[in-house]
Amino acid sequence: MLVPKPLVAGAIVLWITASALPLPAQESAVAPRAGPTAISTRDMVVSVSRPASEIGSQVLNQGGNAVDAAVATAFGLAVAWPEAGNIGGGGFMLIVRAGEEPVFIDYRETAPAAATREMFADGKPPSQYKLVGVPGTVRGLALAHEKFGRLPWDKLIAPAIALAEHGVIVNDALAGSLNGALAKSPDFPELRRVYAPPEGRDKWQAGDKLVQPQLAVTLRLIAIEGPDAFYLGRIAEQIVVEMQRGGGLITKEDLAGYQPLERRPIHGTYRGYDIYAPSPPSSGGICLVEMLNIVEGFDLRKHPRWSSRTVHVMTEAMKRAYADRARYLGDSDFVRIPPQLTTKEYASDLAKTISLAKTTPSEQLAPEIKLAKESEQTTHFSVIDRGGMAVSNTYTLEQSFGAKIVVRGAGFLLNNEMGDFNPQPGITTRDGQIGTAANEVRPKKRMLSSMCPTIVCRDGEPVLVTGSPGGRTIINTVFNVLVNRLEYEQPLEEAVDGLRHHHQWFPDRISLEGSRIKRHPNLVRELEALGHTVTTRYARQGDAHSIARDPRTKRLEGVADPRIDGWAVGN
Ligand code: GLY
């Protein structure tokens, strides 16, 4: 059997933790430099995939900075975590450099020029080919690299090429992900061929090897020719042929015209911390800051973190922010977004509408939206380098394995991100479908996202990098982690592991993680007494691979979310 070379030299080194921190340190006195949690005073990469984190760490070790490592990790995830890691999708990268303005790179997909407002209005399940948005990842990563990268572009892609060629050793999480995709994709023969289990078997298991030779060729083209290979060259031709095969809308001109954008991130404050998070077309930053502003006035800390009082107040904030999301948010290049949503004054007015004795029905919160009647697979990773540069990146194919369409001859998946537009203009349902105008389909428009790669700073230096997959739950996952860490000053492991809750305005119910609810035996009953409808049906909410940094000692703590087999690596 061909065993791939280890991508990071060697032995796990034990590291003695040092100093007192402004925020609490991990409990244990000794922690490894790599593992589900890791400690380092130099740099850190945390992602859902061990080989992808090791690729990022190797790049840091070779003198690359956090952006170099993020680019390499992103290409690594496109090989090692195909359900969401991608070159055929899009996402957001947030970059903080000490003493400089934070930078937000928007590489969200766009609607093809032939897309129309009514294209999904009949309510029938659309063809996956019509759901493919113009991919943004390759030009997005190239823009980040061009502006901030230090190592050559091809060097950052080389480890992903090697991984695709020699094979990814499959762990339980990847086996489950691949088996799930195969079970759900009987009508996608190219997906079934590319991700077929080893010969003679009908399922993947841990220890198998996933080899992707066509993806290796595609990545090599991108490494040698740059992003134009994808948007103007051979890969663009392959995408167009694939679109024509299935009746998709993307043309040569759509691909040639795609541009990532540099935007100002949303900025908020919470108890002396600066919060940076994505601006539209993500709803992440606005909703996160709106919720933090609302709860800031309630002195949550006077009550235990998972008391019904704290969960109630946070939930009321969620409902109000998500109602605003439906009301106002879309691609800001197409719709005007009210500037007051992230102000303290607006939050204070909303806070006054919250009763501590009972929940406010969702219908009361946005009565002007006439009621008639998203997917979760995305991936997030966090990086900090030894110069204190931090990168928070979330990117996606939308659903798990995106549109399930593998571009023939090129070995990579296309997204189905058009599903993030409001499909039926005017039709907003109690089940959670939104039909408001701000996020209707328009040619070349970016669909509204919930992705929320976030960086928290103190005095200009990063102290927390986090984010998560999870569709509309993403913003609430980040909100939970930030409240745990910044309000309750929990150690990072606890802040990441703790029970998460989600409310998205409609359906009018709180979702509490089934896998963790037993830790809080009275919570459901107490929330119901406040008038909430509660579900514990979903075992887990997101996976927030995070890094905490002490700006004084430079100590970094990486925590891969225990909900999935992620990996943290420091040099
Ligand atoms: N497709 C998930 C999101 O952008 O929120």
Image (cartoon, rainbow, N blue to C red):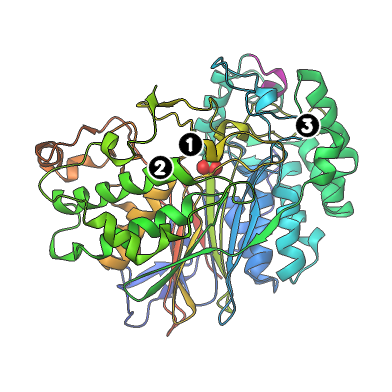
For the point 76% across and 33% down, the residue is 411
The residue lying toward the viewer, choosing from 54 and 20, is 20
Q: Residue furthest bottom?
A: 552
In front: label 1 or label 3? 3
The residue beneath circle 2 is 473
- Above or below — where is 527 with respect to 479? above
Q: Quadrant of the C terminus?
A: bottom right
Q: Position of residue 523 (x, y in %)?
A: 14, 43
In magenta, the rendered stretch is: 187-192
- Above or below — where is 482 with respect to 165? below
The residue lying toward the viewer, choosing from 60 and 484, is 484
Left or right: where 305 falls relative to 210: left
Q: Position of residue 388 (x, y in %)?
A: 55, 77
Q: Secondary structure at mark 2?
A: helix
Q: Which sits earlier in the primary sequence, circle 3 or circle 2? A: 3
* Label of residue 376 in the image: 1
The magenta stretch spans residue 272: no
For the point 47% across and 56% down, the residue is 285
* Label of residue 250 in the image: 3
Q: Which sits earlier in the primary sequence, circle 1 or circle 3? A: 3
Left or right: where 249 falls relative to 37: right
